[in-house]
Amino acid sequence: MKIYAHRGCSGTYPENTIAAFQAAAELPITGVEIDVHLTRDGEIVVIHDEKVNRTTNSKGYVKDMTLKELKELDCGSWRSEEWSDEKIPTLDEIFDIFEETNHRLNIELKTDVFPYDGLADKVVDLAAKRGFTDRVLISSFNHEDVQSLVQGKQVESAILTFEVLVDVYDYARVIGTKRIHISLPSAFRRMTTDALRKGAIVYVYTVNDVNYAEELHKIGVHGIFTDHPEKMLAHFELKES
Ligand code: G3P
Ligand code: MG
């Protein structure tokens, strides 16, 4: 079972920060999941929401701010004063952290609310420039973007789905991928076993309970995204020993 640190080690550190990804880089897990948006001046930044309100000391849309403006914000204090020096990272800064490791990077394009024209191409180009193409898996709830990525044939891509869907594997094949990232509530429905039986590569988000992880492992799910990768590692290592 492949373990991905969801937004970095976001159970312990503020999500999508340098601290959260540095902690993940120390762990023998498969990889990390990273949410990306585009700034007003066209830079790729790592943050989950369209607005900075929840995870910083400011308000407003990422798309309306420049990188310089975003870099002035504190994206750690909302979790604890201990992290008050954390700044919203660029994707380039996250590549720095994983330069010397062999972790895989699942980059989630947050293009389902705002389309961020050009974001997918910018991510593909930056991954290539930094030598990460073989380690990158791009996913999105925006399946038009996933289809364009598949047609570009440069990186592996996955569809993200929250809903329970009938024949999701056949749908994914129309888009051109076998990779399906399914939400935990939907993962125990027939769609998952059907997709696995047909040959899909299924990852499930966000799995923070080891009992659920164990159940998913038993039905043949290939990977999970978790806020607590240390806990999942301990559980699966214990089983193997
Ligand atoms: O990529 C898996 C998961 O991160 C998708 O949902 O809202 O946590 O970005 P969300
Ligand atoms: Mg995400």
Image (cartoon, helix red, strand yellow):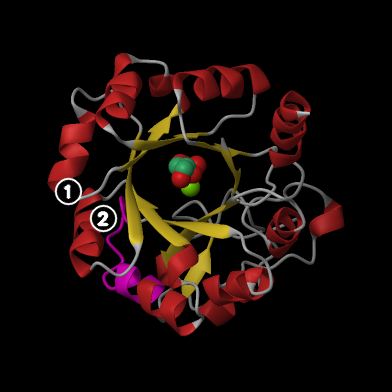
Q: Which mark is residue 146?
A: 2
Main SS category, magenta section: loop
Q: Residue at x 43, y 63 (%)?
A: 37
Q: Residue at x 28, y 43 (%)?
A: 178
User: Which mark is first along the chain, 2 or 1?
Assistant: 2
Decide if ligand 1 comes within 8 Å of the CB at mark 1: no
Give the secondary structure at mark 1: helix
Residue 214, quarter of the rendered image: top right
* Residue 145 shows up from this direction: yes
- Closer to the camera, 152 or 114? 152
Q: Amino acid at mark 2?
A: Val
In the image, the segment drawn in magenta is: 111-123
Judge left or right: residue 146 versus residue 16: left
| Picture coordinates of residue 206, whole percent (x, y) | 54, 33
Q: Specify few, some or many for label 1: CA neighbours under 10 Å numbering under 14, 14-19, or 20 or more.
A: many
Q: Amino acid at mark 1?
A: Ile
Give the secondary structure at mark 2: helix
Q: How many marks?
A: 2
| Picture coordinates of residue 208, whole percent (x, y) | 63, 29
* Residue 109 shows up from this direction: no
Q: Looking at the image, is 217 positioned above or below residue 44? A: above
Q: Residue furthest left?
A: 174
Q: Looking at the image, is 161 positioned above or below residue 31? A: above
Residues marked 1 and 2 touching at CB (< 8 Å): yes
Which residue, given by chain and number where applicable, does mark 1 sit on?
A: 175
Q: Residue at x 64, y 74 (%)?
A: 99
Instruction: State the quadrant of the C terminus.
Output: top right
Residue 111, quarter of the rendered image: bottom left
Residue 192 is one of the magenta-drawn residues? no
